[in-house]
């Protein structure tokens, strides 16, 4: 599976937007970009995914670079409940390969 | 949304005994279930993939005789850790998906401690 690179940690303030970057320079044409997050001591949960176009859902937005070598997960207004590890994953088959992710801390 | 449960949520067992962990899809039929292991402050590592009615496919380095997986129905998969040792202590997480879904639905995890 193609690899992704994310910052180890990021910090945000409550009710401010958060932009979580992900680099995936070796992405192939069939790879979808998926984001999951994991709250402490819980299983991961799906956040969003996309292929080429930017995507929005109730949880977040996903901005994908034109060359698809990077993407950014956008939380429009961070809350304390958004504190989690965020994983950017390239998926071309049924498997998910988790990297180290970004630990997001949200300050009140 | 789709719900996946795991039982037990935490278990402590003695070294040398076997432990069974159940993973259930509560409101959908899962064609495929996955088992992951996560050590403290580490990422999830896929152990195996199981499809209903067929043998599980194990990832490289995962001992199939030690981690027995049974996917007997479209709503239940079990992971049995046989002859558990302290180094098997970990957070075990299952997920489930359907053939036409882009999403994996994860269970809450089972914390196994082997003493």
Image: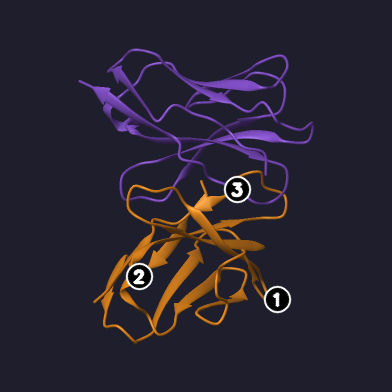
Q: In this view, does A29 lie to the left or right of B13?
A: right
Dot 2: chain letter? B
The residue at the point 55 percent across, 75 percent down is B63
Q: Name the residue under label 3.
A: A96
Q: In the rendering, what colour is chain A?
A: purple
Q: How many marks?
A: 3
Question: Cα distance, mark 1 to mark 2?
Answer: 29 Å
**Mark 2 residue crowding within 10 angstroms, few (<14) / some (14–19) / many (20+):** few
Sequence order check: which comes first, mark 1 or mark 2? 1
Q: Is mark 2 on a helix, strand or loop?
A: helix
In the picture provided, is A3 more to the left or to the right than B106? right
Q: Which residue is drawn at 69% across and 34% down?
A: A32
- Compared to residue B29, the image places residue B12 above or below, namely below
In the image, residue B86 sits, relative to residue A45, either above or below, namely below
At horizontal 23% and vertical 77% (from top left) the residue drawn is: B115
Give the residue pinned by disc 1.
B54
Please tell me whether residue A55 is drawn above or below residue B33 in the rendered image.
above
- Mark 1 belongs to chain: B
Q: Gap in Å between the C-alphas at discs 3 and 1?
A: 20 Å
User: Chain B takes which shade in the image?
Assistant: orange
Name the residue at the left extreme.
Answer: A108
- Against A102, residue B36 (above or below) is below
Q: Do the residues labelled 1 and 2 touch (CB within 8 Å)?
A: no
Does residue B7 appear to the left or right of A45 in the view shown? left
Q: Position of residue B103 (x, y in %)?
A: 60, 45
Q: Confirm whether residue B30 shows in the render.
A: no
Q: Does residue A91 appear left or right of residue A37 in this picture?
A: right
Q: Could you say which disc has been placed on residue B87 in the image? A: 2
């Amino acid at each position: 599976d193609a690899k992704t690179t994310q910052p180890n940690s990021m910090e945000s303030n409550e009710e401010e937007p958060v932009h979580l970057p992900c680099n995936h320079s070796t992405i192939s044409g069939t790879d979808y970009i998926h984001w999951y997050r994991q709250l402490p001591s819980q299983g991961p949960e799906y956040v969003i995914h996309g292929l080429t176009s930017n995507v929005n859902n109730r949880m977040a937005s996903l901005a994908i670079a034109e060359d698809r070598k990077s993407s950014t997960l956008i939380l429009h207004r961070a809350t304390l409940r958004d504190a989690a590890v965020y994983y950017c994953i390239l998926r071309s088959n049924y498997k998910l390969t988790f990297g180290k992710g970004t630990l997001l801390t949200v300050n009140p | 949304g789709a719900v996946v449960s795991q039982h037990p949520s935490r278990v402590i067992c003695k070294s040398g005994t076997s432990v069974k962990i159940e993973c259930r899809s509560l409101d959908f039929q899962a064609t495929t279930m996955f088992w992951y292991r996560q050590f403290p402050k580490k990422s999830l590592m896929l152990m195996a993939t199981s499809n209903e009615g067929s043998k599980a496919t194990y990832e490289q380095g995962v001992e199939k005789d030690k981690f027995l997986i049974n996917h007997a129905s479209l709503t239940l998969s079990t992971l049995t850790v046989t002859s558990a040792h302290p180094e098997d202590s970990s957070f075990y997480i299952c997920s489930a998906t359907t053939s036409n879904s882009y999403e994996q639905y994860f269970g809450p995890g089972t914390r196994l401690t082997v003493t």
